[in-house]
Amino acid sequence: MSVPSGWQSNRALYLLFNRFADLIEIEGGQDAKKSVSYRRAAIALRNLDQPVDAMAAEGRLREIPGIGAVLAAKIGEYLQTGHVAALDRLQAEIPAGVVELLALPGVGARTAGHLWHALHVTSPADLETAIRAGRLKELGGFGPKKEQALLAAIGGFRSPRLILSAAWDLADALRERVAAVPGTSRGEVAGEARRGCPLSGAVVLVAVGEGAAIAAALSRLALWARDGAPMPVASAVTATLDGGVPLRIALSPPAAFGTAMCLATGSAAHLAALGELPAAAEEEAVYSALGLPWIAPELREGTGEVEAARAGQLPDLLRESDIRGDLHTHTRWSDGSASVAEMASAAAARGDRYLAITDHSRALVIAHGLGPEEIRRQRREIEEARASTGMVLLQGCEVEVLADGRLDLDDESLRGLDFIIASLHSRFGQDGPTITERALRALRHPLVDMVGHPSGRRLPERPEYPIDLERLVDEAAAAGKALEVNGSPDRCDLDGVWARRAAAKGVPISVDSDAHGVSGLAFRRFGVMTARRGWLQASQVLNTREPEGLLAWLRRRRGA
């Protein structure tokens, strides 16, 4: 197989080390604690600000936080061969269906291992049988509600879906390949990725070219599954990518390219509202022929956008250029990969006017969170970076919300901070009323400015926890607190539906990257796409304000 290079090597190793950690935990035994090292290494690789294969070539792998001799050797082995023998052995020992259990809500690696070892559950189908036979009661920890949630998830078990960044990266790489095929004059990304959907069930492109030539060129890539399936080339090139994700390249004549883009972008509900589409070379001409202005892809979900367009009431959607600063970032003080000065310089280079450094608090042990003393020492570094970069730097903190809703830092420490995010990163198994009251107690703390990634989902494997978002939105509106649209592509949280509801009630929305390194600042793009899916305009977004406006909002909110 071909070995990923450049930035793709970082993502490939991030996924590989997380899979390693999962398999170690599933296997159990005395080595289970080693999974923590692999997960920390995965985070460091994801947040790395340079391609890992370049660092390996220069003999600098040990400079990466958490990478010692053993893990460096495994990275080197993968970059040279495309495999890690130890991982291959684990994968051979553990049934593939046990790993599939991780896609189910509430089933982590240790739980999957317990189900396997204790009940011989080796697939989602086996788990369904065990639930219906009442066998989960032998293990404990599986009440009726959890069993019903698992049955519902098993019933809807689907093929793999890509998070937004992965869908875009893969689609864009394939688009470049398609564009390079002789005779291909045009190629664009369509489908769910173009609409900014948090998960994509397929990679979709539209191309002007000859299907047989495109199929022949792409079939040589290691991305394609080796199943020998024929690839139709009359009106589309189709295949299955490694990992089971479908690919479809719609072929179009130049004169109908705009129509093909509309059809391939979707959604089905949007297309149904449009009716029959005329043939046109550009999308704008398609909509114009229907008596409509062009509708942004993020709005095309059949939620009233066609009616709004017909009435001349489409929103002037938020643009990434409207954002003036990022209010959720991490540095080496917790689980980030860059210094305060490096993050500030990178943000300034992107055109930002301000930056909030919001490292984790101490209760999030895996992230090496900060206590009061570390916060005091960090303040000095922030002051130095502020002087050297000229950026408006806020010292903030992503404070952990404890199991009972208390904050992880004392009020004296909180009062010394400029911006406080309250976030939940644990105890997701609490029932709906409990986890809702926990979040509301944190929101009500007078020093909290914003609730981070409010639904708690981690895509694609963890759904949102059972929080009553309606109550959270209402209380945020009443208290003048902000809620976040977190652009980290495995979150995109709040989603578009709830961002729209919150903004309509006057809740300030902050669109942030949750960057854990310089490269992560680019994740704000996905936050903007998510906000646009929620019909958000710049005036509804907190961090579109100039520095003076943001600081004035903070003073008013805190009564200063």
Image: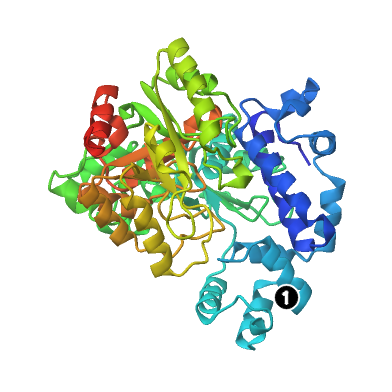
Residue reaching furthest to the bottom? 133
Colour basis: rainbow
Image x and y of residue 550, in percent:
28, 29
Residue reaching furthest to the left? 311
Check the image and report above or below for 341 versus 447: above
Q: Mark 1 — residue?
A: 121
Task: Depth check: give the residue in front, 32 or 263.
Answer: 32
Residue reaching furthest to the top? 388
Task: Depth check: give the residue in front, 199 or 548.
Answer: 548
Asked whether the viewer can see residue 184, the reply is no
Under circle 1, the secondary element is loop
Residue at x 34% of width, y 36% of height = 281
Asked whether the viewer can see residue 39, the reply is yes
Image x and y of residue 307, in percent:
18, 53
Task: Depth check: give the residue in front, 101 or 386.
Answer: 386
Check the image and report above or below for 209 versus 140: above
- Quadrant of the image occupied by residue 183: top right
Where, quadrant-wise, is the C terminus in this rendering? top left
Check the image and report above or below for 17 versus 389: below
Amino acid at circle 1 = Val
Task: Please tell me how many numbered marks the rendered image carries.
Answer: 1
Check the image and report above or below for 238 versus 218: below
Image x and y of residue 375, in percent:
51, 32
Density class for disc 1 (Cα within 10 Å; few <14, some 14-19, many ≥20) is many
Looking at the image, residue 480 sits to the left or right of residue 417; the answer is: left
Residue at x 57% of width, y 73% of height = 154
Residue at x 67% of width, y 85% of height = 135
Looking at the image, residue 11 sits to the left or right of residue 60; the answer is: left
Where, quadrant-wise, is the N terminus in this rendering? top right
